[in-house]
Image: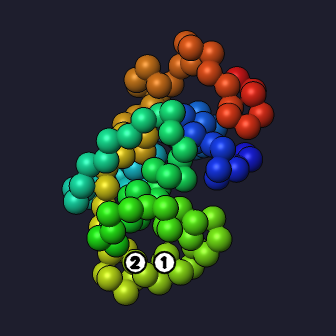
Amino acid sequence: LHWKPTVHLTRDVVRQAIIPLTAGKRCSYAELLHPKPPRPDAIVTHSWQTNFRDLVAAIVADALGRHEYGVIADLLDWNREALVQMLRAQGSMTKTYWVCAFSVGQHESICGTNACRETDSLTGIE
């Protein structure tokens, strides 16, 4: 598994990490981590064509009560521990978000196939 935060899209993460990690149980990533996932505090809508780091940054920004995620994206790249400390200080470490990439079983949906022949944003490999 390779990772370049400024390049990889949400679809790359689903195809290269989530689907392989959940293939054995054919479940969602959320169910793999928590057989009975908690009720989410918020539902996140997103595009599969956007930078995954920005998706995570937007979620963390919301958990911190911020309206902008640029600084959070930078901290994800350079100082994740600072973000963890900020989340802990605000009591936001247990806030849960429903994100389809993690919450939907990708093996049972159209997402488990690659009908459009999409390739990895960094390597170009299908």
SS at mark 1?
helix
User: Residue visible at 72% across and 46% down?
Assistant: 1
- Disc 1 vs disc 2: Cβ atoms closer than 8 Å? yes
Most foreground residue, 10 or 66: 66
Q: In this view, does 66 lie to the left or right of 16?
A: left
**Residue 18 appears in view:** no
Q: How crowded is mark 2: few (under 14 residues within 10 Å), some or many (20 or more)?
A: some
Task: Check disc 2 and give the amino acid type.
Answer: Leu
Q: Is residue 107 above or below residue 117?
A: below
Task: Give x and y (percent) for residue 107.
Answer: 47, 28
Residue 49 in the image: above or below residue 53: above
- Identity of the residue drawn at 40% across and 50% down: 30
Nearer the observer, 56 or 36: 56
Left or right for 43, reference 51 = left
Query: What is the number of the mark on residue 84?
Result: 1
At mark 2, the secondary structure is helix
Callout 1 crowding tier (Cα within 10 Å): few <14, some 14–19, many ≥20: some
Find disc 2 in the rendering and name its residue. Answer: 87
**Residue 54 percent coordinates (x, y):** 50, 52
| Quarter placement of the C terminus | top right
CA separation in Å, label 1 and label 2: 5 Å
Looking at the image, can residue 96 be seen?
yes
Look at the picture and state if 1 lies above or below 41: above
Between 120 and 100, the one nearer to me in the picture: 120
Check the image and name the residue furthest to the bottom: 89
Q: Quadrant of residue 68?
A: bottom left
Q: Residue at (50%, 39%) from the top-left corner?
A: 50
